[in-house]
Amino acid sequence: MTNEQLLSHQLPVVEHSNFEKHPRRFLNKKLVAKLFFFIPVLAGVIILFFMVEEYPWIWKAAGVAWFVFLILSVFISYKEFFVRGYVLREHDITYRHGWLFHHQITIPFNRIQHTEINHGPIDRYFKLCELDIYTAGGSSSDLSISGLDPDKAVAIKEYISEKTAQHA
Amino acid sequence: MLDISKPTRQSKLSILFYLFKGIKGLIAFVFFAAFSMRSWNSFMGIAAVSLLVIMATLVGPIVQYWFFKFHVENDELIIQKGWIFKKRKAIPVERIQSINITQNIAQRVLGLVAVEIDTAGSKAKELEIPALDRHFAEQLKALLGREKQKKAVEASPITYVETSDTEDIPSVKNDSKIILQLSFIDLLKVGITQNHLRSGGLAIGVVVGFWYKIKDVVENFFGDIFESVDVDIEQAVKQPEAFGSSILLIGIGAIIIFIIASVVVSLVMSINKFYDYKMELKDDYLEVRMGLLSKKEIKIPLSKIQLLEFHSNPLRKLLDFKTARIYQAQSQNNQISSVEVPACQSVLQSQLQHLIFEDTLEQPKKELLANPWSHARLDMYIASIFGLPLIGIAIFFEFYWAIFIPVVFVGIVGVMAYQYGKYSKLTRDDDFIVFYKGWLFNSIIISPVYKTQAVEKWRSIFIKRRGEAHLKVHTAGGSRQLKYLKDEDINAMQNDINNQVIQSNKSWM
């Protein structure tokens, strides 16, 4: 048995670990979800085309705005996919996400209260699910990792529960 | 000895308490009914409805009293209430974080108190038993405390000496030390050094809100009088020179009235809030008592305290004291989880700090400085959103001298933000993370490293190339962040804090 002294500055740093990527179909799901949001808005533009005939510039402007927003949000989703990732280490979990606003949050297992797996209808179609990690107190430090493979999510959840049980 | 193994009702006086609560609504209704009467017919209808409402107000409290029961069963505190919609809340005794006794003015008149049971961390809302007589409430508090301690002893393998037996005799407190007691002079000082701008705004808000409520009524009765003194505002704008001096006078008068009103409101509010303030250390928890019209008694276990903050402002700097705020592990939207300690002299500051976290601040090992230019830049961008349209308007109407106003405004905002960034930093020694934030209205936030729950680094795409990011430290008592720090410094800090939390076995909440 070894029992070497560890000093906190000798422990490995997060930046050197390999962030695990989400499955590719998560990107597809994101894009489909975006379309689901934008198609009803397009209906609004079409209604404008028929209703306001005397000012054609209104529906043209609305159409252009719709198109620009669509391209922009597809672009952001696309960019986001490649910076999203998580690292599971022996004592903590780190998750990073966001392109426009990039976040990287680390939660040690001895501060986790409980975990949960959720999935919505679109998630189910793409065989994805969301892992929610809860900490004590307010909800500000809760973590929700969306777009995970269900098997993997269960594995992570079990790993975390096992680890947190040791500290409880 | 108190026995609550069977469902118990509250004090009978609680009927009156519920009646008090109901009567507020009743008065509003009567007011409404009285003003909406137009003819004899409508009078009959309204009278019938009123009778119904009055009946409901009178019978309701009795029903409420009868169906509100609480008891302890199998180490769970169970509260049942409601007649048609029955509710049953059960809370395991060992989950109880703190038990607070509070008293508002209605309860004060009746000699009743409310017992609030707080359960941090869980999502269950905190429970309240609103009307108990004082003696009973204190016994209940002691009983629940004892039960909880019993559970804790059973749960932990190390048995320690039970000190709880002394708790049911209030006169024998084994270790009680008064930390702070405010005299009336202190109270005045606290009142005068409040943020008057905020209380002034509050006063205006209340007056305006109240005015809109009674506007219709007043106009109905006194409309004629108002019409006769109607000032022609349009005229005043078109020909300011005709009204010149009087407008200036009215303006200055309004400002003076605003200042006086703000100070008075601050004074009244802080006297009401902190009257008879007393903070005591008993065993391993702090007991705080305060309030004039609505009394509050708060009990905070020392081990549950997550954050300690000291706030200051220019007026307080003159008198050399700060306001401390203590945050404990909170459940969702629980207001009581932070306690204010007004009039904190520097001796008391270090005393509080030592008492709560058992260690004193050392010379910081690491220091992260915020970039003041980044703060200034962001705030000036935001100010320009309002400033640029103003400049546009000024140019459009050819009031070229008016461009001066938004330019100065943006400039001042920039300087303030620069100073904020200049005096903001984050330091860390072996045990504590300390945030220093702000310039004129500065604050110091102290949090023990091992109480950290998660560390977050975030940045927008725009500051990525500047190599800057924001650091956010999450605790069970809330999250605190500092913006615009160096990216690589944050990485080091984040790893440091995280590794220290991993290694710590101390209970953090």
Image (cartoon, rainbow, N blue to C red):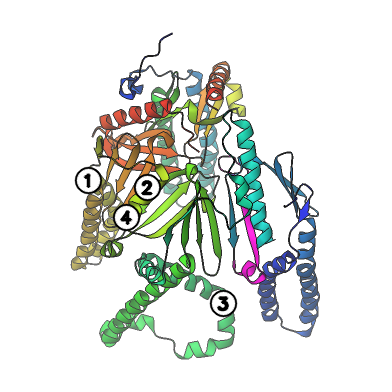
**Which-is-in-front pick, marks 3 and 1?**
1
Mark 1 residue element: helix
**Which-is-in-front pick, marks 1 and 4?**
4
**Which-is-in-front pick, marks 2 and 3?**
2
The 10 Å Cα crowd at callout 4, few under 14, some 14 to 19, many 20 or more, is few
**Which-is-in-front pick, marks 1 and 2?**
2
State left or right for residue B299 relative to residue A71: right
**Do discs 3 and 4 share a chain?**
yes
Residue at numbered disc 3: B214
Residue at numbered disc 4: B347
Q: Earlier in the sequence, mark 2 or mark 3?
A: 3
For residue B115: magenta? yes
* Residue B295, x across and y down, in percent: 55, 64
Q: Amino acid at mark 4?
A: Val
Residue at 52%, 37% (x, y): give it: A136
Q: CA distance from mark 2 to mark 3?
A: 49 Å
Q: Tell me if residue B486 comes above or below residue B442 in the rendering.
A: above
Residue at numbered disc 1: B372
**Which-is-in-front pick, marks 3 and 4?**
4
